[in-house]
Amino acid sequence: ALPICRCFGRTVRCYSHDRRPRGRIVQPDHADRVLRRLELNLFPALGHRAIADLKTRDLIEALRPIEARGAMDVANRCSQAIQAIFRYAVQTGRIDTNPAIDITGALATAPTIHRPALPFNRLPELLTRIDHFGGHDLTKLAMRFCLLTFVRSSELRFMRWDEVNRKAAVWVIPAVREAIEGVKHSERGSKMRAEHVVPLSRQALAVLTDLHALTGDGVLVFPSRVNHQAAMSDGTINKALRLMGYDTKTEQCGHGFRTLACSALTESGHWEVGAVELQMSHMERNTVRAAYTHKAEHLPQRVAMMQWWADYLDAQQTGDHVPPVHSTLQADKKTILGTVF
């Protein structure tokens, strides 16, 4: 039986707890976050009232205090949840009309906040600071590997040794990982909930060799230094960057490694946008294009692209800075493809 909760004065099957696949599967941890957000922000104003009695103005008035305290992301997420709940109520016959339709546009739009990343001319500085980082070797190697592969934090932290095929030089991030007992959120795989292939450059493989000497006897590639049965903390890389002298809110954060890589690969002019987007594991919103790229995958180009990125980083560390658009560095596609695939 599905969990039951009281949403707006009636006992219903809340969409945030309905985990049946209807278009997409709602993950349990996401459902719990949505419900908690409702409990903290909307239930005090609306939870005691019957859903059939609520009007558009009631919903907007419940959202205004959230907006007033500047929590725009929370306000917009609550608005989305309200619309989903009322849409579900109409679809299941609990109400005849949907007053949530007209709350769209009632809230101020939150400004887009981009994750900070250094300009390209400071890339040699970043690489040098990572190389001379005085902290734990596992943290230094995590930064190097993250910069080389530019994957998301959870994809990196929950990486497992059995996901790596050294012979093929690829790391395959599954859509969902098998949970490890006692390791919170260890079931998280690719954020896009689809298998994601990460070609491994020679430099990335070298980092994995160093990592194997540290953590190769365990399941996780990046376990916690305090407790090897747990994963590395989400804040480890950002803490290291702060120790290296960077402001992670304005200069460089761990997620900003993705920004650096995406910008460099795009600006170099060597790679198709589709190949870059696939390697970034961005969601394709055009369903026709998504169907095509899912089949094509641009794998040969992505293999060459990942090696080019690793070589570009090496060149920046050992020589004068050259912007990606002016770089003459080329990846030897025949050699890479002949060796790897």
Image (cartoon, rainbow, N blue to C red):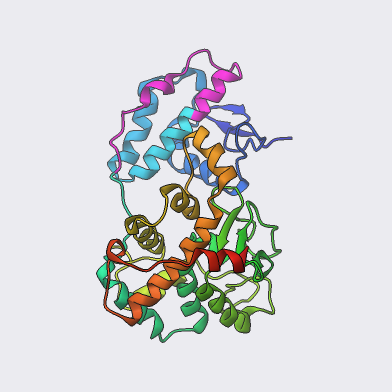
Q: Furthest residue to the top?
A: 96
- Magenta residues? 84-110
Above or below — where is 302 with respect to 7?
below
Horizontal side of 248 relative to 10 (left or right) equals left
Q: Position of residue 170 (x, y in %)?
A: 60, 64
Q: Nearer the viewer, residue 94 or 270?
A: 270
Residue 335 image-quadrant placement: bottom right
Q: Furthest residue to the right?
A: 1
Q: Which residue is rendered at x = 45% and y = 37% of the image?
A: 44
Q: Which residue is rendered at x = 31% and y = 67% of the image?
A: 327
Horizontal side of 159 relative to 283 (left or right) equals right
Total labels drawn? 0
| Residue 169 visible within the image | no
Q: Position of residue 284 (x, y in %)?
A: 48, 41
Q: Position of residue 161 (x, y in %)?
A: 66, 70
Above or below — where is 227 with respect to 25?
below
Q: Is residue 293 magenta?
A: no
Q: Where, quadrant-wise, is the C terminus in this rendering?
A: bottom right
| Residue 278 visible within the image | yes
Q: Is residue 103 magenta?
A: yes
Q: Nearer the viewer, residue 89 or 173?
A: 173
Above or below — where is 25 with respect to 237?
above
